[in-house]
Amino acid sequence: MAYLILSNGAVFEGQRIGAPVDRVGELVFTTGMEGYLETLTDPSYYGQIVTHSFPLIGNYGVISQDFEGAPALFGYIVREICDQPSNFRSQGTLNDFLLQNGIPGLCGVDTREVVRLTREEGVMNALICDELPRDTAFLKAYRVERAVASVTRKEREDFAPVGPEKYRVALLDYGAKRNIIRSLQSRGCRVTAWPADTAAETILAENPDGIMLSNGPGDPKENTGCIAELRKLLGKKPVFVICLGHQLTALALGGDTVKLKYGHRGGNQPVWDLETGRTWITSQNHGYAVVADSLAGKGTQTFVNANDGSCEGMAYPDLNCFTVQFHPEACSGPKDTGFLFDRFIAMMGGTGHA
């Protein structure tokens, strides 16, 4: 028997899976029915204990080709874990993966109740442990800190295009998912991925055709150094921005961000396209949102979350830049908005995919 203890005092019993260590983290939930491997390896989950709303997790095993990065989450909560996966690509069980990567978790937990509490009361901190502590005051004091610094790559890395080279793209890695790079490579882009704290002058000295800002974890306002460098980059080259980068860009231009009650995490998030009137189904993983009104006169809102009305995208035509909160690379998830990569290619002078 082990426990998940929430900072509001709620206690859930379960059985240990993964690493046999106690861990504090920010408790969040994801609504995806599949894609647990991408969730486990998405750097944007740094500092968080992830709860799956879907009841059975692990049924297709562990497939390293589907990883999006190095695991960064602090804990893992499921209703039921599959210990006999069935998939011709499977390389092992989910529990073994958690053990090998030092991730503690629980199964047998009433995850529907955990999600209900989180939706009603908002994101809160939690503890995975074997014994109930006498005092849980320390839970409320926990904060996710130095998130981007903990997950960004440590040195420059180059990725060759698939087929003939058409463009060179500089990617600022705030916790980038690998499929962002693959999406650019498949469109003929040579991608140079840079650490998050790289100076703007260093990137511009390479004279890329375009610049891309990635997803990443944590509070965007914590990244004051990154924001300062973005001010020097914006307007110099075509820029396409995803997730955390969307928030950092807003802050760099004098806008504001707010923490959402429980965030958007999963592959079924509806987004309204203000230009076309269409609604796209998107993959998302974030706990903060841009305040669109704070950018009046500087940018135009382009996408809105159909559930809560929060900002999902901005366009800055004078800077040749557009940003989105969701993940157009979207693996595992819907591919509705992959056309945004083609829009970026067009900004660099190309035509995107045929």
Image (spheres, helix red, strand yellow):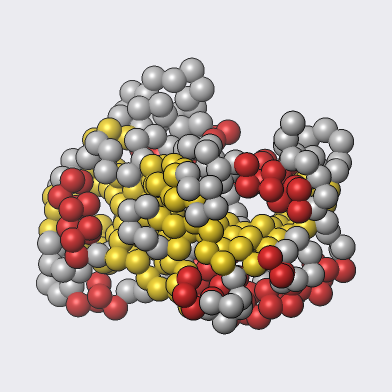
Judging depth in this view, the residue of 193 and 208 nearest the camera is 208
Please indicate whether residue 80 sits to the left or right of residue 142 in the image.
left
Image quarter of the C terminus: top right
Position of residue 345 in the picture relative to residue 96 (left or right): right
- Residue 281 spot, x, y in % from top left: 44, 42
The quadrant in which residue 166 appears is: top right
Residue situated in front as seen by the camera: 351 or 123: 351
3 sits left or right of 225 in the view: left
- Position of residue 250 relative to residue 88, above or below, is below
Residue at the image point whose x is 18% and y is 61% from the top:
120
Front position in the image: 162 or 95:
162
Q: Is residue 349 left or right of residue 135?
A: right
Residue 71 visible somewhere in the drawing: no
Residue positioned 51% across, 22% down in the render: 89
Residue 13 position within the rendered picture, expressed as x and y whole percent measured from the top left: 13, 50
**Can residue 54 be seen at all in this image of the molecule?**
yes
Query: How many numbered circles are shown?
Result: 0
Q: Residue at x 53, y 37 (%)?
A: 335
Residue 285 image offset from top left, x and y in percent: 44, 54
Q: Position of residue 29 (x, y in %)?
A: 31, 52
What residue sits 40% from the left and 55% below the top? Answer: 305
